[in-house]
Amino acid sequence: MLKWERISNRMTPTGTVEVRVNDDGPLGWIVGIVGGGNPNNVTFGPNLIVSNYNLDPRDVVISHEIGHMLQAQMLERLGYNYLLSYVALLTGSHATHPMEQDANRRAGLPPDFPDNGKPSGYVSPFIYQVRGHP
Ligand SMILES: [Zn+2]
């Protein structure tokens, strides 16, 4: 099943991103491998977030992934490839990767999210609507 979301907030232009949930195609497999076999999500660029499970569109993880989406928009405007930039900065820890911390900052999350779970009282800075897609 595919879901499409329209994203906006006070600081960024409106955009549209495709969120693929329960993706069992090649990208879904990659997401699973990257996640070490666990439920996982990967933002592949400014217009595509892929999940290998049935990600709830209200989940805080969506806001983190939208943070990556905004990175991808910015990097591609500057002429950089988002995924290559991510790999180039690869560190041993998700919590210390500069692009993970930046995605969390953009989403108003603690720098080491999701290591300590969802912060209490969290409200996403992003406004988005979810539209089902056949
Ligand atoms: Zn991330």
Image (cartoon, rainbow, N blue to C red):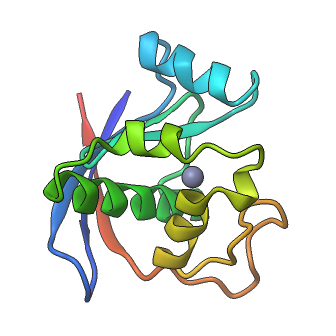
Report the residue at 54% width, 50% height from top: 56
Query: On the picture, is 72 further left or further right than 25?
Result: left
Above/below status of 43 relative to 126: above
**What percent of the width, then of the height, locates residue 9?**
28, 81
Q: Nearer the viewer, residue 36 or 25?
A: 36
Above/below status of 54 relative to 108: above
* Residue 100: quarter of image: bottom right
The total of numbered circles placed on residues is: 0
Residue placed furthest toward the front: 88
**What percent of the width, then of the height, locates residue 2?**
33, 32
Q: In the rendered image, which quarter contains the N terminus?
A: top left
Residue 43 shows in this picture: yes
Report the residue at 20% width, 51% height from top: 76
Above/below status of 88 relative to 131: above
Above/below status of 103 relative to 3: below
Report the residue at 68% width, 73% height from top: 111
**What percent of the width, then of the height, locates residue 122?**
63, 83
Q: Nearer the viewer, residue 121 or 48?
A: 48
Query: On the picture, is 133 further left or further right than 84?
Result: left
Q: Nearer the viewer, residue 95 or 87?
A: 87
Q: Nearer the viewer, residue 118 or 107?
A: 107
**What percent of the width, then of the height, locates residue 83?**
40, 38
Q: In the rendered image, which quarter contains the C terminus?
A: top left
Residue 59 shows in this picture: no
